């Protein structure tokens, strides 16, 4: 293994030197959500033992599910509090770390107490799972309590900016005793509690990647089943919400009232399509249906608007549609769910989904549908490719190829035009993260702790196989010539 890694590292040195392209301020490409980076000169291998190509390694908690994002010299990643950086902040907490991208040192952190009403609202030890989205000096993310926050990118190091000024109470488990705020604490600018404002029922762990369109933030609400996995407690709750980024006010939501048909939870984040002069918000519901919504227009109205639906597409039309929760735990027959994001490329949308990993059938697909060329048009299925058992990843589309790993322990390369397999590769663990394409290479991690690097080509070429020692739940990220790979316990920064 050591020889194979050494050869891979030597091979990577033949590539051109790093070319600093840009920050990576959100999960995937803006709007399209494609898992492809324009960076060049990124190593195809690294060695945790010899430290070859490793810029730094930052310790996280013990469970980390958040994909890192990078902006203005800072790296943002969610984790739990099992390795406290602040001795005054102990116990189970959700944590968003802000690290220096040159050294990996902690600059500040958001530390939020867990919800205690029901463990299924905020599952123990899972920490903060949502990836941050950064624009300018604002960091937008959904914390472990299901609250959408706007944070100052500098934390409290430049003082408490407001208008939110009660961080001490928000960070304290005992609200009657606010915690003292220090320079290494987060600075909340505003907070939108989706439980109170949108009436959602959080389940397991909030996982939302905020999409920005002008002055508005689009995100999945995270509403789902209760602790029985058979009851929807808030049937009127929206699945897609829109929040004014300037104030934190919830300004719009879907009005489809399909919450009762959510099989597990609403974990897929929205994307945006722009075709024939009009834009469409593309959203995958927890009911296994893909929706197209008209974006909201600038408005000063204080009333909450409903998003106008343009079209819908049933991802799994033969699945049960009534009394769906009686199929909970049925591995042969059940509704479908969609975990990854819809990827928009030209006039097509690519979505992976199928039976729920924990409670659904052992069936999954990657599907390509057309985007209607008029606001009143209907999408059409163009092709369907069978995956192994379950899938949680978002597709990565590059030069006519689609790269996607699944939970059936297989990596797939698929022809973008036909949906036919080009090659597959057996991997040693389930893939909960997505693959990343960068510099003509494909990076992917698994729950077994295996990290693989392939050539992004129609001929299968495995360039490197590394064992990082801990499960990998985060999609690799590249920014400014550095590759970031997060495991459950560590964040690696890799650079030539």
Image (spheres, rainbow, N blue to C red):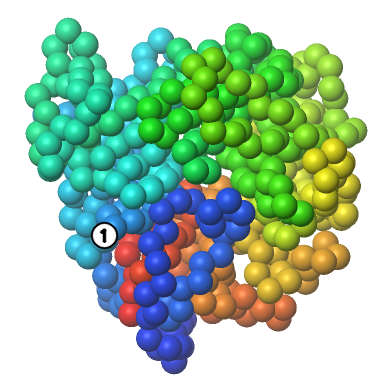
Q: Is residue 334 above or below residue 431?
A: above
Q: Nearer the viewer, residue 392 or 417?
A: 417
Residue 203, given in percent of the width and then of the height, sits at: 53, 22
Residue visible at 21% across and 11% down in the picture: 175
Q: Is residue 176 left or right of residue 267?
A: left
Towards the viewer: 381 or 213: 213
Residue at the far bottom: name it. 14
**How many C-alpha atoms fall within 10 Å of the one at disc 1: few (<14), some, or many (≥20)?**
few
Report x, y in % for residue 116.
Answer: 36, 14
Q: Residue at (24%, 52%) from the top-left corner?
A: 99
Q: Quadrant of residue 313?
A: top right
Q: Quadrant of residue 320?
A: top right
Relative side of 271 to 459, left or right: left
Residue 63 in view: no
Residue 478 in view, yes or no: yes
Image quarter where the N terminus lies is: bottom left
Q: Residue at x 87, y 55 (%)?
A: 383
Residue 451 in picture, x, y percent from top left: 48, 64
Residue 262 to residue 60: above or below: above
Tag 1 secondary structure: loop
The spot of residue 27 in percent (x, y) is 49, 51
- Say which residue label 1 marks: 73
Q: Nearer the viewer, residue 491 or 170?
A: 170
For the C terminus, the image quarter is bottom left
Please tell me in which quadrant of the rendered image residue 236 appears.
Answer: top right
Q: Is residue 355 left or right of residue 166?
A: right
From the viewer's perspective, is residue 218 above or below residue 434?
above
Residue positioned 76% across, 45% down in the render:
364
Using the image as rendered, state which of residue 230 and residue 5 is in the foreground.
230
> How many marks can you see?
1
Relative placement, left or right, of 360 versus 108 is right
């Amino acid at each position: 293994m050591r020889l194979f890694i050494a050869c891979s590292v030597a091979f990577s040195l033949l590539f051109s030197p790093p070319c600093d392209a840009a920050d990576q301020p959100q999960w995937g490409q803006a709007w399209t959500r494609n898992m492809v980076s324009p960076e060049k000169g990124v190593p195809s291998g690294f060695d945790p033992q010899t430290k070859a190509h490793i810029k730094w390694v930052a310790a996280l908690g013990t469970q980390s599910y958040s994909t890192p994002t990078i902006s203005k010299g800072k790296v943002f990643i969610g984790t739990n509090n099992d390795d406290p950086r602040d001795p005054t902040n102990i116990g189970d907490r959700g944590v968003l770390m802000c690290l220096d991208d040159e050294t990996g040192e902690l600059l500040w952190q958001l530390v939020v107490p867990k919800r205690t009403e029901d463990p299924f609202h905020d599952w123990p030890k899972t920490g903060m799972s949502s990836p941050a989205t950064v624009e300018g000096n604002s960091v937008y993310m959904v914390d472990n309590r299901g609250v959408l926050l706007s944070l100052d990118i500098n934390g409290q190091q430049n003082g408490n900016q407001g208008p939110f000024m009660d961080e001490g109470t928000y960070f304290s488990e005992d609200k009657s005793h606010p915690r003292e705020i220090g320079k290494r604490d987060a600075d909340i600018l505003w907070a939108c509690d989706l439980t109170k404002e949108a009436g959602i029922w959080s389940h397991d762990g909030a996982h939302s990647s905020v999409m920005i369109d002008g002055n508005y933030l689009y995100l999945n609400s995270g509403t789902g089943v209760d602790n029985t996995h058979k009851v929807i407690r808030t049937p009127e709750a929206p699945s897609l919400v829109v929040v004014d980024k300037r104030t934190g006010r919830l300004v719009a939501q879907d009005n489809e009232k399909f919450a009762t048909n959510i099989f597990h939870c609403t974990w897929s984040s929205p994307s945006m399509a722009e075709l024939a002069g009009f834009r469409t918000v593309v959203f995958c519901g927890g009911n296994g249906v893909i929706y197209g919504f008209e974006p909201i227009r600038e408005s000063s109205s204080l009333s909450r608007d409903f998003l106008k639906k343009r079209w819908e597409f049933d991802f799994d039309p033969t699945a049960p549609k009534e009394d769906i929760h009686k199929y909970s735990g049925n591995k042969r027959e059940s509704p479908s769910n969609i975990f990854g994001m819809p990827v928009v490329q030209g006039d097509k949308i690519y979505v992976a989904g199928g039976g729920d990993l924990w409670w659904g059938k052992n069936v999954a697909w990657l599907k390509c549908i057309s985007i209607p060329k008029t606001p009143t048009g209907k999408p059409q299925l163009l092709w369907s490719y069978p995956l192994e058992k379950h899938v949680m990843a978002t597709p990565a589309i590059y030069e006519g190829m689609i790269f996607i790993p699944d939970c059936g322990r297989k990596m797939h390369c698929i022809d973008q035009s036909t949906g036919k397999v080009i090659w597959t590769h057996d991997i040693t663990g389930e893939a909960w993260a997505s693959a990343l394409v960068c510099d003509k290479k494909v990076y992917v991690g698994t729950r077994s702790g295996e990290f693989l690097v392939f050539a992004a080509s129609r001929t299968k070429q495995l360039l490197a196989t590394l064992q990082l020692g801990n499960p990998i739940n985060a999609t690799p990220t590249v920014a400014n010539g550095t590759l970031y790979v997060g495991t459950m316990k560590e964040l690696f920064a890799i650079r030539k």
